[in-house]
Image (spheres, rainbow, N blue to C red):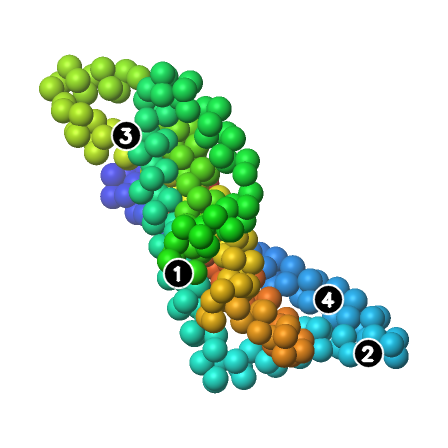
Amino acid sequence: MSNDTAPAGLNILNSMMGANASQRLLKSSWRGLMNFFGGLAILFVIWWFGIYLISSNTSTEHFGDFGPIPAIQAIPVLWEEGTIQSAITSSGYRLGSGLLIAICIGVPIGILMGRSKRFRELSNSPFQLLRMISPLSWEPIAVIVFVTWNQAIIFLIAIASVWPIAFATAAGLAKVDPAWFKVARNLGAKPWHIVTRIIIPAITFDVLTGVRLALGVAWIVLVPAEFLGVTSGLGYSIQDAREGLSYDHLMAWVLIIGAIGYILDSSCVMLIKRFSWHRGDQ
């Protein structure tokens, strides 16, 4: 092969490899979409069939409004009324505030646990004890301590979210090679440099994993916490629909809560993949 034809052959080979990679990516994306919609279709069929069997009985025919079709039809009505936007805004504020507080407290605690053996040994038993207390158990205390229900709900979300973040941060820091810190100190790094240049980049993946776990816990706590004392939010909307016997609206809110939770969790997964050290191998 001459020198002129060799680069041309390499270009053709590279083009073929690029085309194959694009085809694999397209095939993977198509398979992912099929699995996504296929799984949802199976879920809705099971849901519809279950409600159909229940509502076939004359004594329980009023449960027909719990079906997927009435719930889906109710969503545009709730959107036009502005109820969905208002509920998402109120619950989003509480959820975001609680998670932000949990991150600001949990990450420093996790760093201390990961860096100080003495602190880790002393804090293990009290932290494990507090972690195993149901977040909703704090509700009567929160109502007494805080002036408004908004503050009480934010506290419940924060107390539920702080432990996954703290323990995930500590676990991530424990995986960092101690030689990194020795090298940094030998090169004259200050404590702030060690935190910003070594610890934070090294534990970002684990912190985001902890945030994902905390988000799941906080999302579960948020809805029942909004059942009492507030007049806005996703939990209040479910309670209001139940008291008004609007079963189609109730199931619509259940769908909305599930969809929002899925979107939030998927966003966390994308961030985790973005900061994963092994994302090139996936």
Which residue is the site of mark 2? 61
| Residue placed under numbered mark 1 in the picture | 148
Q: Is residue 44 visible?
A: yes
Work out how far the residue at label 1 is from the one at label 2, CA to CA, in angstroms. Answer: 41 Å
Q: Between label 1 and label 2, give the one nearer the viewer.
A: 1
Question: In the figure, 282 relative to 265: above or below?
Answer: above
Residue 267 in the image: above or below residue 282: below
Disc nearer the start of the sequence (2/3): 2
**Residue 154 appears in the rendering:** no
Q: Mark 3 belongs to which amino acid? A: Ile
Which marked residue is nearer to the observer: mark 1 or mark 4?
Answer: 1
Relative image position of residue 190 (x, y in whole percent): 14, 24
| Above or below 269: residue 277 | above
Residue appearing at x 31%, y 34% in the figure: 108
Q: Nearer the viewer, mark 2 or mark 3?
A: 2
Q: What is the C-alpha distance between the residues marked 4 and 2?
A: 15 Å
Amino acid type, label 1: Thr
Label 3: which residue? 199
Please name whichever residue, 2 or 264, is drawn nearer the observer in this view of the structure. Answer: 264
| Among the two numbered marks 3 and 4 on one chain, the one whose residue lies closer to the N terminus | 4
Q: Is mark 3 on a helix, strand or loop?
A: helix
Q: Name the spot of residue 214 as percent of width and height, x first.
A: 46, 45
Q: Marks 2/3: CA distance?
A: 60 Å
Disc 4 element: helix
Q: Is mark 1 on a helix, strand or loop?
A: loop
Give the residue pinned by disc 4: 47
Determine crowd level at label 3: few under 14, some 14-19, many 20+ residues with C-alpha closer than 10 A. many
Q: What kind of residue is marked 4? A: Trp
Query: Does 50 sit left or right of 168 as displayed?
Result: right
Separation of disc 1 and disc 3 at Cα? 37 Å
Dot 2 amino acid type: Glu
